Image (cartoon, rainbow, N blue to C red):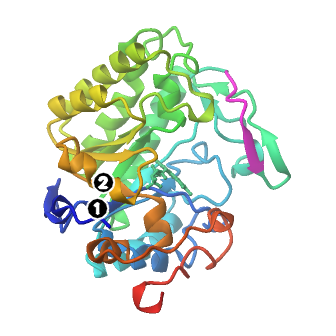
Amino acid sequence: MTTSSSLWQPFTLGNVELPHRLALAPLTRSRANPDGTPGELAAEYYGQRASLGLIITEGTQPSEDGQGYLNTPGIYTPEHIEGWRKIADTVHAGGGALFIQLMHVGRMSHPDNTPHHRRPVSPSAISAEQDMFTPMGPQKTPVPRELSAHDIQATIAGFRHAAASAIAAGADGVEIHSANGYLLHQFLSPNSNHRTDEFGGSVESRSRFVVAVARAVAEEIGADRTGIRISPAFPLGGINEGDPVDVRTQYRHLVGELATLKLAYLHVHHLGDDELLRSFRDTWPAALLVVRYGRDREQIADDIDAGLADIAPLGRFALANPDIVQRLRTGAPLNELDPGTLYGGGAAGYTDYPALAHA
Ligand SMILES: Cc1cc2nc3c(=O)[nH]c(=O)nc-3n(C[C@H](O)[C@H](O)[C@H](O)COP(=O)(O)O)c2cc1C
């Protein structure tokens, strides 16, 4: 049972007043329509979880190039905006705030999964060599096309447009996905970025694209409506950021640069280097969200209690328990997650996890 009182203190994040220190972590559910409009159950799904306060959405592509997985939503067409508006309205009606996660997957894609069927893009022509689920079954991610200098500027402009579209849909902000092996992480990591221009080589140059995206988004919609997620050393999608000393150097520099932009929050998918996390805490001027990898129910409040985090977003607990806030407050038992219904499909494992009264 999670009794720590630190979880139940209100918090101001950017422009948003939060009732407690929990949040919904971004969770890809692959139930959007083929054109990238959120599916018809998405408003119900997010609305059921509005008591989490800060609702960070599933990874959402800012452009056609940004899509990697089947049936993920987009936020770059008028239809996408209309679809997201229903979700924003439902979350607001439930007292929550909506941040749409902007996820450009870069090389973690396959032409069979994108609207334009073109080769995926990345800082360098280096394959992630991962299995990707496609309509033809699992296939290897191909060797991506290296982004040209012009492509890089167009990609940044795409993030800008997507952020503006999120606000037009009624979202309270966006979270830039710079974690988990996707495009921004591919720029940061030396094994996926072999560029010799100003976007590759040194720690400073490998950080440049991430900082440029964050600056553009903050300029477009306001820094107080912009968050960013990182996952130092997380080896997803073929990423290898080197030894812990290199990782610390990279991320201390990046977080220092991002700190000058006065963003609403930094969201860390944290693998366990507490010295690094402590240095973020000491230098980051605003809210720090921490998802500690592998924590159990009893450990949810630990980083807040230790002064290492302000907010503890929940992924799988919240996926399987729409009323997780009430359950944690009262020490009620939790629903079990069904791994078979995480991605794709309909209501089963999406909107039909029971709330307490019906559990
Ligand atoms: C089904 C599923 C989908 C996920 N999709 C995303 C995503 O779209 N974007 C992201 O940044 N992280 C994603 N994650 C990672 C979660 O946000 C979270 O960091 C992770 O599940 C660990 O937290 P937990 O132990 O509370 O589940 C996903 C995780 C799961 C289980």
Give whichever of discs 2 and 1 has the lower sequence position. Answer: 1
Relative placement, left or right, of 261 versus 240 is left
For the residues labelled 2 and 1, say whether their Cβ atoms are less than 8 Å apart: yes
Q: In the rendered image of this protein, does residue 174 appear above or below residue 357? A: above
Give the Cα distance between marks 2 and 1.
5 Å
Asked whether 337 or 121 is in front, the reply is 337
Q: In the rendered image of this protein, does residue 75 appear above or below residue 321? A: above
- Quadrant where the N terminus sits is bottom left
Q: Amino acid at mark 2?
A: Ala
Q: Which mark is residue 22?
A: 1
Q: Residue at x 48, y 87 (%)?
A: 359
Relative placement, left or right, of 297 versus 305 is right
Please say whether residue 7 is one of the residues in the magenta stretch.
no
Q: Residues in magenta?
A: 126-133
Asked whether 49 or 166 is in front, the reply is 49
Q: Residue at x 54, y 70 (%)?
A: 336
Circle 2 is placed at which residue position? 312
Q: Main secondary structure of the magenta part?
A: loop
Q: Secondary structure at mark 2?
A: strand
Q: Secondary structure at mark 1?
A: strand
Q: Residue at x 64, y 38 (%)?
A: 108
Image spot of residue 161 (x, y percent): 41, 48
Image spot of residue 244 (x, y percent): 42, 18
Q: In the rendered image of this protein, does residue 199 appear above or below residue 290? A: above
Relative placement, left or right, of 20 versus 139 is left
Q: Is residue 92 visible?
A: yes
Number of other residues with Cα within 10 Å of mark 2, as a class: few under 14, some 14 to 19, many 20 or more = many
